[in-house]
Image: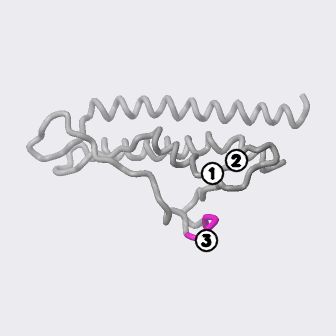
Amino acid sequence: MLDQLTNSLDFQSQALQLRSERQRLIASNIANADTPGYQARDFDFSKALQQATGRMSQAASPLGIQRLTPTPTHAGHMNLQGQAAGSSSTTELAYATPSMTNLDNNTVDMDRERANFAHNTVQYEATLRFINGSVKTLNTAITGQ
């Protein structure tokens, strides 16, 4: 029973972790906007989410639904194979394509980074609201009120 409750929130928690990581990358790009030679980094969110949630275990539930393999949430945690967190395949970071050339070879485009930051913030907030709604619905179902 507890496993079913966990699985229902797993997709959104994976999305929230990826949104948080993307926010950190964008903030790093903005912080290094004046660093000579800095190469802006980002990743394809939809591809990363498919990778994160696409790792299905072979075991199926009694209803025939495949269960997601749990992923570690802290660097000290171990995964199912007994490896430290982060030692398996991770999201591929890509370098941003410069929109215009700079003399200092910095590829940070502040307009693009601000837009990405704002968009990711809205998506992060939407994911949090969805998780809150799911938890409230589950709480209502459990308490029967």
Q: In the visual, does 28 lie left or right of 50?
A: left
Q: Amino acid at mark 3?
A: Gly
SS at mark 1?
strand
Instruction: Give the crowd class for mark 2: few <14, some 14-19, many >=20 residues within 10 Å.
Output: few
Q: Is residue 45 left or right of residue 144?
A: left
Q: Secondary structure at mark 3?
A: loop
| Image: magenta residue range | 78-83
Q: Residue at x 32, y 47 (%)?
A: 94
Give the residue furthest to the right.
144
Disc on res. 56: 1
- Image quarter where the C terminus lies is top right
Instruction: Give the residue type that dot 1 points to.
Output: Met
Question: x and y percent of residue 82 in the render?
Answer: 61, 71
Q: CA distance from mark 1 to mark 2?
A: 7 Å
Residue at screen point 49% across, 29% down: 122
User: What's the image's color scheme?
Assistant: one colour
Name the residue at 22% across, 50% down. 38
Q: Percent position (x, y) of residue 43?
A: 39, 44
Give the numbered dot on residue 66: 2
In the structure shown, which secondary structural element does the residue marked by tag 2 occupy? strand
Q: Are marks 3 and 2 in contact (CB under 8 Å)?
A: no
Q: Residue at x 46, y 42 (%)?
A: 47
Spatial CA span between label 3 and label 2: 22 Å
Camera-nearest residue between 50 and 29: 50
Of residues 17 and 36, the one drawn nearer to the viewer in this rendering: 17
Q: Is residue 97 left or right of residue 125?
A: left
Q: Is residue 115 magenta?
A: no
Q: Tell me if label 1 and label 2 are in contact, CB under 8 Å.
A: yes
Q: CA distance from mark 1 to mark 3?
A: 18 Å
Tag shown at residue 82: 3
